[in-house]
Image (cartoon, rainbow, N blue to C red):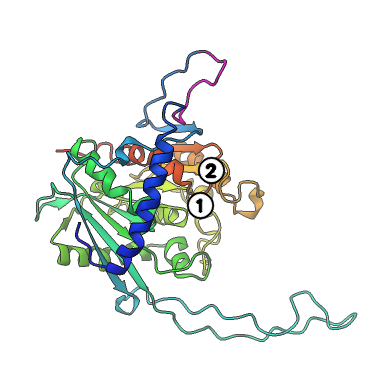
Amino acid sequence: MADKAPRIRALIFPLALALAVTVAVVNGQRGQGQGRQGQGPGQGAATPPASPLLDGDVSIRPPWSNANELIVDNSVPHGTVYRFDMKSEDSKIYKGVPARAPRGRGAAPGAANAPGASAAPVAPVAPGPIVPYVRPVAVYIPKQYVPGTPAPFIVVQDGYNPKYHLTIPVILDNMIAAKRLPVMIAVLVQHGGGDGPGSERGLEYDTVSDVYTKFIESEVLPKISKDYKVTFTTDPDGRATMGGSSGAACALTMAWYHPELYRRVLSYSGTFVNQQSPVNPEIPRGAWEYHQTLIPNSPAKPIRIWMEVGGNDNGSTAPEEGLHNWVIANRHMAEVLKAKGYHYRFVFAEEARHTDASVILQTLPQALEYIWQGYPIK
């Protein structure tokens, strides 16, 4: 494996060890239940689970089992992972966000200085300086790739999260060799730091616009093509994007705004809630608008999507009026996708939490196979 960033490698190896321990523990559960649909105890013989490649809604439940595709197979060709950094000062699109300023001095909102007196005004605070950052990026190139050949690929948000960084290369090695996936490249892009409103990650992933897609198309892909001698296909059917949480919302945003570029989407615990910052008056509720206005009020687009949410996901007990319940948001997504005739598969993972690693380790190979249906495999 080629490795261009020693400091990142030092971080990845402990994470790899942790994942290996997880694999060993969860594999020990095999034979005790597969976490899939079927009849429970006392209900007679279990029925075979429906094909994971079918459209529609499905529920899965624990115990969870790691997919066999996560096991390193030395009998198949192994791809190479190259790692590099991108500095914010070199970007024309994402220079960084202002440092989060402290609250202004003065009385707390709603407090009064004396009976009948109004609250003291809060002193305005100027935005802090732009905070630079370094963005790690990795690219997986399969052994079977022929230089100069336009290759299908997938863009992975939060690409250095071990749930994806340590699993996708192994899965692709195995599934490409088995001809269950095309000979494809994976571009694993980390965000610029932080999380939620006011952060670089929030700006990149929760903004409902085409800015992030322009960043990938104009800055990330050209650098990889130049430095690692790969050619990315321009066929939108050969371009996929995926992520978890806000990274999943970002993945849909890429395809929604540019279906001529991306048409295959994979989402874990998608943040289809009201979390956009800064607020865009045209899309006032951020990604919540996807299932409330954008998808219902637009002609169907040529997008295929696999999506999951956990029963104990973020905000699972919060009222819908707060626009911050991931379970409700993802159920609404499934409803509107079905109503508009999309190819979609919605997986409800009982008892699972937000971007639950156990669910990802069980379902990611099937999810990849689902979204790549219809693409020629040679």
Q: Position of residue 130 (x, y in %)?
A: 44, 81
Residue type at mark 1: give it: Phe
Mark toward the start of the polypeptide (1 vs 2): 1
Residue type at mark 2: give it: His
Q: Position of residue 207 (x, y in %)?
A: 46, 63
Residue in the picture at 54% in, 46% down: 353
- Given residues 350 and 15, the one toward you in this image is 15
Q: Quadrant of residue 65?
A: top left
Q: Position of residue 67 (x, y in %)?
A: 36, 37
Q: Are marks 1 and 2 in contact (CB under 8 Å)?
A: yes
Mark seen at residue 137: none
On whether residue 125 falls in the magenta region, the answer is: no
Residue at image mark 1 = 272
Is 147 placed left or right of 196 in the picture? left
- Compared to 321, does 36 lie above or below? above
Q: Secondary structure at mark 2?
A: helix
Q: Position of residue 375 (x, y in %)?
A: 23, 39
Majority secondary structure in the magenta region: loop
Q: CA distance from mark 1 to mark 2?
A: 9 Å
The magenta region covers 34-44
Residue at image mark 2 = 332
Category of crowding for the residue at label 2, using alpha-carbon neighbours closer than 10 angstroms: few (below 14), some (14–19), many (at least 20): some
